[in-house]
Amino acid sequence: MKDNKSKDKRRQILGRVSPEEFVGRAVELKQLVNHPRLAGPARGMLLLLAPSAGVSELLRQAYDQLFNQDEGIVPIYFSFTRNERTAVSAAIEFLKTFLRQYIAYRRDEPALVEAGLTLNDLVQLTPPADLDWLEALVEGYNRERFNNDDRSFVRFCFSAPQRVPVRNGRPCVLLDAAQLPESLDGRGHFGAEILRAFSQSNLPFVLAGLRRQVLDAAHRANCNFESLDIVRLRRLADEDARQLVDHAAIRQQVVINEQTRDLLVQQFEGSPFFITAMLQAAHQKKVPLDSYLDCEQLYVDELMGGRVNHYFNTFLEEVATQPELRRSLIRVLWESSAGDLSKISGETLRKVLHLEAEPFEKLLQALHVQEFVNWNGAFVEVGGGPAPWRDYLKVRFQMDISGEPRAQVVADAIAAALKRAPHTMARHYRSAARVGLRELLERFDCQRVPKILFDSAEFNETLRGSPPEQILAQLESSDELRVPQVVHVANSEAYGADSRLAFAEERAFVARAFQDAIYTDANETIWLVAEVDSKLEAGMELTESWCVRLETLAKAARLTRTRIWLISNEGFSEDAMSVLKSRGGYGSSRQQVELLTTWISGTQAVPKLGSAADEFELALPMGENNELVAASIVEQIARRSRFRPEAISQIKTAIVEAYINASEHSLSPDRKIYQRFRVESDKLVVTISSRGAVPASLAFPKAGEEAQVEASSAATQERRGWGLKLIKTLMDEVEFERVDEGTSLRMTKYLRE
């Protein structure tokens, strides 16, 4: 369709990063590029994004790919901005953008896409094949512009793509509505008007914006959802977010390391907006981000007066134009979320803010769209939004309401962020080591599974440590249990605020199910499932306490016909299983859950390693009982390598002792323990090390130095000496080594068939 066919299919036109550096949205990008080719007449796409998930660059990358293709699809990218105050000004800008990008495509001249051209300039640049219809469009524009009917004029401008002759190309409009105003000039619902205009056309289009706002606009416009494709854009996955940090750091020439990269990913929950804002700020201020202190100092700078501050300030100034209203809003949002009152009635909040009904509803709708609050018309739930929003409210409250000195607020914010950083990472590592209960429960669908996988005492007595082939054979001949059909799974915290105090995040779930997929009250059952932290087999007292927790949750949430299922790394003792069975509950070890997952997936095979050497590396923050994570991982490796149960137990105990020793005495600046697991055909080699200046004789002494440790009179020294001797007893070979950056302990356990 183009007059000058291009050979370069990878030209960067609107994209702000190269295609190679654009990460995490490959699936969505492919959907966008394929949409105009696969879509029928008036087929639209709604791209629903979570706040701060980032969508502009995705649309720009899609635009570049469509522009560089020679398939007659004319991409038009238009972004609504806060600069547009009226529907008329937005419509004029759209028409100019459309003509500029259309002519750039037809002439195959990307430089015209963002050129500052007037309508007369564009007419002069129009290819001969487009001159007639484009001149008629400009004449119509000039006529409509001065007829004093703003609504008709706006519709005329947004209908411009429909006037392109079929032989000249098929426009596909990509609307970036991440900042779409609810209304312009205070009249109507602008998003609904836009959707009506494009839904009634015969062209494909994409509307990308905040999920609550876009869906509301679609309903107000009475869209036919049968003719809409819906794509949901959530936060980046951890691995994609890490790649984003790496690429952005290189592009911005900012020094980072693995630890600070992971901190940025977790602290900002994979948000492209906050991650790129931080790296841009680091580049501008020429500061490295290679320590937690560097990251949090820069973060607080941004929170107090940088990009993050500007982002939230701009929003508040738009929704609460009066300074006194902003102060009242900040006060009520912070005090409600910081206290016990997270849910308040809308009428109470309206009176506190001294607003009439209409401006109050407009304010709440804006907060609801950004997901800072949840509003159902009667009640308002506060405390939502990303962590930077909550931090912003806190510092604004301290300065604007409490009147605290700025220096004190900054110091408090830095200290709070630094205290929070290790806990943030510890939660991440624990989450990475979890067994995936939610995913497993969601796959329950009346399958028949080995009953022994729900009885840890029986499994440990008969199968634990057995060769994979024997386990598989025993499972296939075991008595069966039919799991129910699970129809809904939610975190325990979704059933009440009190449960957040009793259960760790992503470790306890409530699953509503029906036995035999028969939807009657008699067949309905609710599974209360939780992971229990225990270094050894969970005993009767611990198991009893967890049962009480879950039963309390069920009572508070009015859940009946419940079944408890507890999971512990090592399973449960016989007495503990008696406690569970007396309640009709189940107890499983981590290994049993993994086998159950494999069984339900249909593979019914027990994984095992070959004879070639495999190597695994792991870095965990010190403290927070993270030695359990390391022990759990080495258990899986040792089990796959066919170590016997007693050998696995010895390896795990040695790992825990070595980890605790290193944590107690390392002066490491990054506060991490590094582990390397090397699997060979006849042995497992575990290396544990820490960085920084370390008093090695206190942590991992060389041969001949143990006496010095044992001679120490302090109780901690006595315990440490015992621990080191225990490690040597448990493992076949133990070697200590001082290195420039710290101390290393290498332990070897040989495989004995």
Image (cartoon, rainbow, N blue to C red):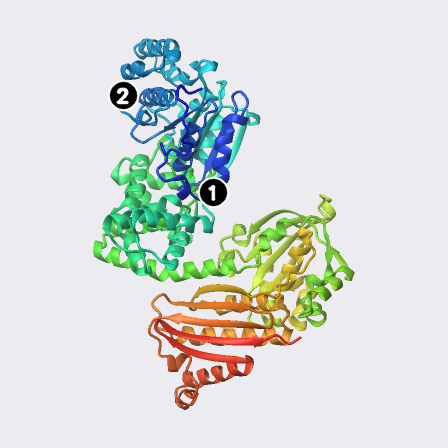
Q: Secondary structure at mark 2?
A: loop
Of 291 and 47, which appears nearest the observer? 291
Left or right for 406, reference 191: left
Rate crowding at label 1 as few (under 14), some (14 to 19) or many (20 or more) other CA atoms within 10 Å: some
Rate crowding at label 2 as few (under 14), some (14 to 19) or many (20 or more) other CA atoms within 10 Å: some
Mark 1 or mark 2: name the one nearer the start of the chain: 2
Q: Secondary structure at mark 1?
A: loop
Mark closer to the observer (1, 2) = 2
Task: Report which quarter residue 554 is drawn in.
Answer: bottom right
Left or right for 116, reference 561: left
Find residue 82 and report its horizontal and vertical position in percent.
31, 31
Work out whether residue 101 can be spotted: yes
Residue at far front of view:
7
Reply above or below: 753 against 55: below
Which label belongs to residue 332? Answer: none
Residue that carries the numbered disc 2 in the rendered image: 117
The type of residue carrying mark 1 is Arg
Q: Residue at x 26, y 24 (%)?
A: 116
Of 558 and 626, which appears nearest the observer? 626
Task: Report which quarter residue 289 is drawn in.
Answer: bottom left
Image quadrant holding the N terminus, namely top left
Work out whether residue 364 can be spotted: no
Q: Residue at x 31, y 39 (%)?
A: 316
Find residue 76 and report its horizontal and vertical position in percent.
40, 25
The type of residue carrying mark 2 is Leu
Report, in whole angstroms, how far the alpha carbon at label 1 lies from the one at label 2. 37 Å
Residue that carries the numbered disc 1 in the rendered image: 234
Q: Residue at x 75, y 63 (%)?
A: 473
Image quadrant holding the C terminus, namely bottom right
Find residue 613 and report its horizontal and vertical position in percent.
56, 66
